[in-house]
Image (spheres, rainbow, N blue to C red):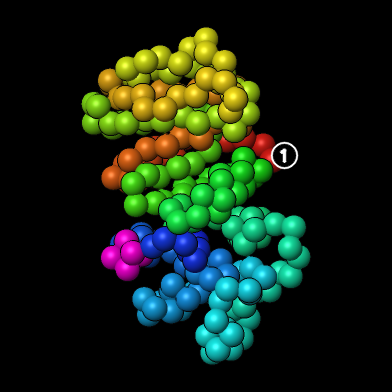
Amino acid sequence: MATVLLVGGGATRPDGLMALAAKVNTVIAADGGANVLHAAGIVPEAVIGDMDSARPELLAALPEGVVHRISEQDSTDFDKCLRHVTAPLVLGYGFLGGRVDHQLAAMTVLGRYPERRCILIGEEDVMMLCPPELDLTLPPGTRVSLDPLGPVRGQSQGLRWPIDGIDFAPDGRVGTSNEVAGPVHLRFEAAKMLLILPARSLDQLILALAATTSSWPAL
């Protein structure tokens, strides 16, 4: 699966960044993510954003055509990147951790582009908008949290606490800290459910996405 690593200016670690860069075909910076990549000695194939965080001298030193300035202020740099980058899978690093408002904004963007497959990666967790159906193979006891972006219902197999018949909603029932009890199958009726797993589950999540053709239409 062709994969893009999208790097933001939030919380990152050099070893984590290098490990992720080794998994992908292309590395792109979201504005201030260019500073993070420069510190790691990685030249991005593109820098996308309003350029209010990336250092001007760094941008000036990049090859012609790498910097894509989008000046409008009605969306975040993550939003700008996700709507302009085309790839079967995007790994987002540097968007979780740090400021809570930035994290919430990133979660909102996942729901805004349900047709895009994007995994956000933090120090403790990985997160994505769950596709209509997904099969996961994870060790028993692995934490599986489900956080609704809007009203949504679903079905499950292989979870300690099945979700069938539950009306999930941001101001109602949520699915924090469920657990794997066997092979997991998830199905949802709307593009409204965030799936949150431990960071160590990233490779299994990537494999699960590669194995399913189930996807949401664009809004």
Local secondary structure at mark 1: loop
Q: Give the image location of residue 27, x and y in percent.
A: 47, 67
Q: Is residue 35 above or below residue 27?
A: below
Residue at (52% x, 85% y) in the render? 58
Q: Give the image location of residue 55, x and y in percent.
A: 55, 81
Q: Is residue 167 above or below residue 6?
A: above
Residue 83 visible to an observer of this rendering: yes
Q: Main secondary structure of the magenta part?
A: helix
Residue at (61% x, 44% y) in the render? 108
- Magenta stretch encompasses residue 128: no
How many numbered marks appear? Answer: 1
Image quadrant of residue 54?
A: bottom right
- In magenta, the rendered stretch is 13-18
Q: Give the image location of residue 119, x and y in percent.
A: 47, 47
Q: Residues within 10 Å of mark 1 (few under 14, many from 20)?
A: few
Q: Which residue is mark 1?
A: 219
Residue at (28% x, 45% y) in the render? 200
Q: Is residue 8 left or right of residue 123?
A: right
Q: Image quadrant for the C terminus?
A: top right
Q: Is residue 175 or residue 208 the one in the foreground?
A: 175
Residue at (38% x, 62% y) in the render? 12
Q: Is residue 177 left or right of residue 46?
A: left
